């Protein structure tokens, strides 16, 4: 059934305090939950208390210490209903409930489960109800005191939220620990971990002098790989104090890394739980991308302590209130710690390759949805990434000072609240003395708006005509005009920004931002000595599709000399994308796509020593095959897309190899590995050059040498990718793939890379290879990272093979989803989103995709998670 935003209403009961006792045994766990609750003022005194459950094994219940049963109580695995006449607004009662859990059988990885012997929880969004009956919704805030008991050998470490208050021995070689969390929190932030874990520990003193013990726990023998995560944590804490004035608030901050986890990480109060992938690193096994990912996710979860935990969400429709805002904060952190331009390009790349396709297909939904069947399916690129873009637009519209004032007001006013998007917006309206009512449409209207720009120049006058439109999409939300902040610059032929004042009567312009609020508007700049180059949407100041009727010469010139590095990237990437799109549509490999001027622009940008190496590597990256397909939009033939992209790569290799080798030579090598941004940028550029240079050689020798000489995973994996993807039939590729396996077969995170690499070999017959890999002894469907590497890698990272003309790619993925669904529905549903663009393909492929989806939909006993994605994809 469907949950609707307009049906929100507060609970009849308030839970103020929760005391829990967990007794962990080898084959079961016993849980006692004592909730202190009272009736909300003004509610019907006869209404019963109805608690959520999910597949629970009920043991007993009592009220104020007296057993209850019979007519007062109505219990099923997913609901507990109790009449509570003794509870009033003035009189609290204590409800005690006992449940029995089987963590070792919990393969869904929601609630309390075991991973490699370690007891661990995941409660967001609705996992707490798999532990005990509760008002499992984010607007019920309580303090928690948790006692954990376990065998001392199986679980020397016992953790929960908040501060440790007591620990000691019990009989039978068992022991206990008590944790107290003084901050009222919703149940989705509850966490418990118990196991034989290795800690690394450091201390942090907050700005106001609180001493905090920071600990990262890993499975035995892995703690030497947690050092960088610890460093990232301390930098995050410092940054949040400086940038937003936000300090940590408990005596301890604990992080636990586990190998089986449905998502990246979870911000449970004082006890973050992480996927191994976002904690464990060393140069030999992790790439620069992994280092960057750890830094980002560590920061993200830490930042949630304020944006998510201290201020949480009233209901799950408000998810972007914490996620969009926290992504914005982690993006800003990375920009400050590394390079702003490089981070912005990376974020825009993520937005376009994940959020845009979602927003343009059957899974479209607004940043704040108004209805859902399964909330876990709304932890999406739209809520996270577009949500962050909306916060960024508020910052752009208000400017730094007023934006910070709005954030300060939000923390001051809503600390301790379960808040809404309206609460958030109001803080910026008040602090910024602005009306954001029209802006708020961004939260309700799904789809990627189109921004059209036309320019004309005569007699020293430049006219910019803007228009916006939003096509109706599958979400069926309104399409009214939005507020679109357009950051811009007028650039002279020497690559300098020109100061120009808009004429009266123009659309609103504030500094370098044009605020488009109407369907169309114009801005005029007079007294210009020459026609400037118009650089619009700098920094991707709004998440729109830009249609700028701009002469190719101007675009190439901007790619060369826009003083804004992001502007250079955007000019080039848009031009290249359009050429690839048109080339694939025309069907020829030569038709227009392989324009020498474009190859020249790409090569020249890589040569440009004024740009940092990381940025040059980004400039060189061609749009991926999925991105080209999205630009085409309909009737896509992935073989043509592949062919056109290959043709452009070959052309760059043919015409640029000498200049690109020169770039490589001037870059030199690094002595030893350091994960800092500058070193990573040099590696990125050097590795980006490996592909065209190998294509120019027409031989795998160069990549094989790079592979042999590599002293870190970044270089090794880059070389292996060229070998396995470009020269898959060569002996050198076969040898390298085999030696990589032998060297790293005991390392799960590296084996994920191995499976992913083989799943993404861009050839139709990769499907047969992937079918075999699903039988590999190291393939484990029940491990989310492994399932994502092989199935997800194939379905989202291999356009050619997944979208095979005979439909076998679709059928295989659907079959895997059918197998995975009963084991782990959440991960199955996530992987099923790979079908989100099926309607963009030509009719034969569409027919196969539809048949695969319909077959899935007809599978008896499909989980709500997977059924929701499949049904929405078919609509
Ligand atoms: N709150 C977590 C984070 O973004 C992610 C939780 C995802 N939960 C889910 N049910 N998919 O930091
Ligand atoms: Zn988050």
Image: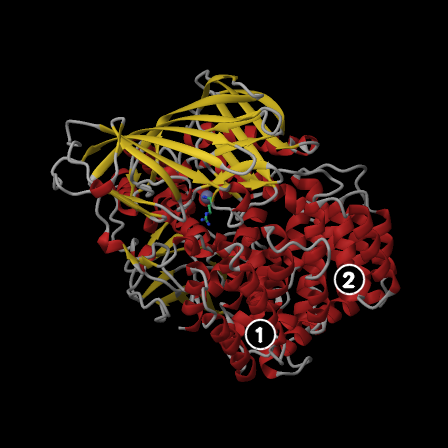
The N terminus appears in which quarter of the rendering? bottom left
- What label sits on residue 797 in the rendered view? none
Q: Which residue is mark 1?
A: 581
- Side of 243 relative to 467 (left or right): right
Q: Are marks 2 and 1 in contact (CB under 8 Å)?
A: no
- Side of 874 relative to 680 (left or right): left
State the residue in front, 856 or 481: 856
Q: Residue at x 35, y 68 (%)?
A: 470
Locate residue 386: give its quadrant. bottom left
Earlier sequence position, callout 2 versus callout 1 = 1
**Residue 359 percent coordinates (x, y):** 43, 64
State the residue in front, 538 or 191: 191
**Residue 298 percent coordinates (x, y):** 54, 37
**Residue 138 percent coordinates (x, y):** 33, 41
Which residue, as the protein is rendered here, is positioned at the far front?
70
Tag in front: 2 or 1: 2
Q: Is residue 285 above or below residue 629?
A: above
Q: Residue at x 75, y 44 (%)?
A: 746
Q: Residue at x 49, y 77 (%)?
A: 850
Q: Which residue is mark 2?
A: 724
């Amino acid at each position: 059934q469907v949950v609707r935003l307009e049906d929100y209403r507060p609970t009849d009961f308030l839970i103020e305090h929760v005391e829990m006792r967990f007794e962990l045994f080898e084959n079961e766990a016993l849980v006692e939950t004592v909730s202190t609750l009272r009736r909300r003022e003004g509610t019907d005194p006869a209404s019963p208390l109805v608690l959520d459950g999910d597949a629970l094994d009920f043991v007993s219940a009592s009220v104020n210490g007296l057993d209850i049963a019979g007519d007062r109580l109505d219990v099923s695995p997913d609901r507990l209903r109790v009449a509570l006449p003794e509870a009033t607004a003035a009189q609290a009662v204590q409800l005690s409930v006992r449940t029995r859990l089987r963590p070792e059988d919990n393969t869904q990885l929601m609630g309390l489960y075991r991973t490699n012997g370690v007891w661990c929880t995941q409660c967001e969004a609705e996992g707490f109800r798999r532990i005990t009956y509760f008002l499992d919704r984010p607007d019920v805030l309580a303090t928690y005191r948790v006692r954990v008991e376990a065998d001392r050998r199986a679980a020397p470490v016992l953790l929960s939220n908040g501060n440790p208050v007591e620990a000691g021995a019990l009989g039978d070689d068992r022991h206990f620990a008590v944790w107290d969390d003084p901050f009222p929190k919703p149940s989705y932030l509850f966490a418990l971990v118990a196991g034989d874990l290795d800690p690394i520990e450091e201390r942090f003193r907050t700005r106001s002098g609180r001493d905090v013990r920071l600990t990262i726990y890993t499975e035995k023998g892995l703690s030497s790989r947690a050092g960088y995560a610890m460093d990232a944590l301390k930098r995050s804490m410092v940054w949040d104090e400086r940038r937003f004035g936000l300090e940590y608030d408990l005596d301890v901050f604990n992080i636990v890394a586990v190998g089986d986890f449905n998502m990246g990480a979870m911000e449970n109060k004082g006890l973050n739980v992480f996927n191994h992938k976002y904690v464990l690193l060393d140069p030999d096994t992790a790439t620069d991308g992994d280092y960057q990912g750890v830094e980002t996710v560590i920061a993200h979860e830490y930042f949630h302590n304020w944006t998510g935990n201290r201020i949480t969400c009233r209901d799950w429709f408000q998810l972007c209130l914490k996620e969009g805002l926290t992504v914005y904060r982690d993006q800003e952190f990375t920009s400050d710690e590394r390079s702003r331009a490089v981070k912005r390009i990376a974020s825009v790349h993520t937005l376009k390759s994940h959020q845009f396709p979602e927003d343009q297909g059957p899974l479209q939904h607004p940043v704040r949805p108004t209805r859902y069947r399964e909330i876990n399916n709304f932890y999406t690129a739209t809520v996270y990434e577009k949500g962050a873009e909306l916060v960024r637009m508020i910052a752009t519209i208000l400017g730094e000072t007023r934006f910070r004032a709005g954030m300060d007001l939000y923390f001051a006013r809503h600390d301790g609240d379960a808040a809404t998007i309206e609460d958030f917006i109001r803080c910026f309206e008040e602090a910024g003395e602005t009306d954001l009512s029209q802006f708020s449409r961004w939260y309700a209207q799904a789809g990627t708006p189109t921004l059209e720009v036309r320019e004309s120049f005569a007699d020293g006058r430049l006219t910019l005509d803007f228009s916006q439109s939003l096509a109706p999409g599958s979400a069926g939300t309104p399409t009214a005009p939005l507020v679109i902040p357009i950051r811009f610059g007028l650039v002279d032929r020497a690559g300098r920004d020109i100061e120009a004042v808009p004429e009266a009567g123009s659309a609103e312009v504030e500094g370098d931002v044009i605020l488009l609020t109407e369907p169309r508007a114009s801005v005029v700049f007079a007294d210009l000595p020459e026609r400037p180059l118009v650089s619009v949407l700098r920094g991707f100041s709004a998440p729109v599709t830009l249609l700028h009727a701009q002469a190719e010469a101007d675009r190439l010139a901007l790619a060369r000399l826009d003083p804004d590095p992001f502007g250079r990237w955007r000019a080039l990437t848009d031009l290249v994308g359009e050429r690839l799109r048109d080339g694939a549509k025309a069907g020829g490999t030569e038709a227009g796509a392989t324009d020498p001027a474009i190859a020249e622009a790409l090569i020249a940008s890589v040569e440009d020593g004024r740009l940092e190496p990381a940025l040059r590597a980004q400039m060189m990256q061609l749009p991926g095959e999925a991105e080209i397909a999205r630009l085409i939009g309909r009737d896509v033939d992935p073989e043509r897309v592949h062919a056109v992209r290959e043709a452009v790569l070959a052309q760059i290799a043919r015409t640029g190899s000498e200049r690109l080798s020169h770039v490589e030579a001037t870059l030199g090598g690094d002595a030893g590995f350091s994960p800092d941004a500058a070193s990573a940028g040099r590696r990125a550029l050097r590795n980006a050059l490996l592909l065209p240079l190998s294509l120019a050689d027409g031989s795998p020798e160069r990549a094989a040498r790079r592979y042999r000489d590599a002293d870190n995973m970044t270089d090794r994996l880059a070389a292996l990718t060229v070998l396995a993807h470009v020269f898959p039939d060569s002996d050198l590729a076969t040898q390298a793939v085999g030696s990589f396996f032998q060297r790293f077969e005991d390392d799960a995170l590296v084996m994920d890379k191995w499976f992913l690499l083989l799943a993404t070999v861009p050839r139709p017959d990769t499907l047969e290879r992937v079918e075999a890999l699903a039988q590999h002894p190291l393939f484990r469907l029940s491990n989310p990272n492994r399932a994502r590497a092989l199935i997800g890698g194939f379905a989202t990272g291999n356009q050619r093979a997944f979208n095979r003309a005979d439909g076998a790619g679709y059928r295989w993925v659907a079959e895997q989803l059918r197998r995975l669904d009963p084991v782990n529905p959440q991960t199955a549903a996530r992987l099923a989103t790979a079908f989100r663009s099926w309607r963009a393909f030509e009719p034969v492929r569409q027919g196969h995709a539809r048949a695969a989806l319909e077959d899935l939909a007809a599978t008896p006993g499909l989980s709500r998670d997977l059924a929701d994605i499949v049904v929405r994809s078919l609509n």
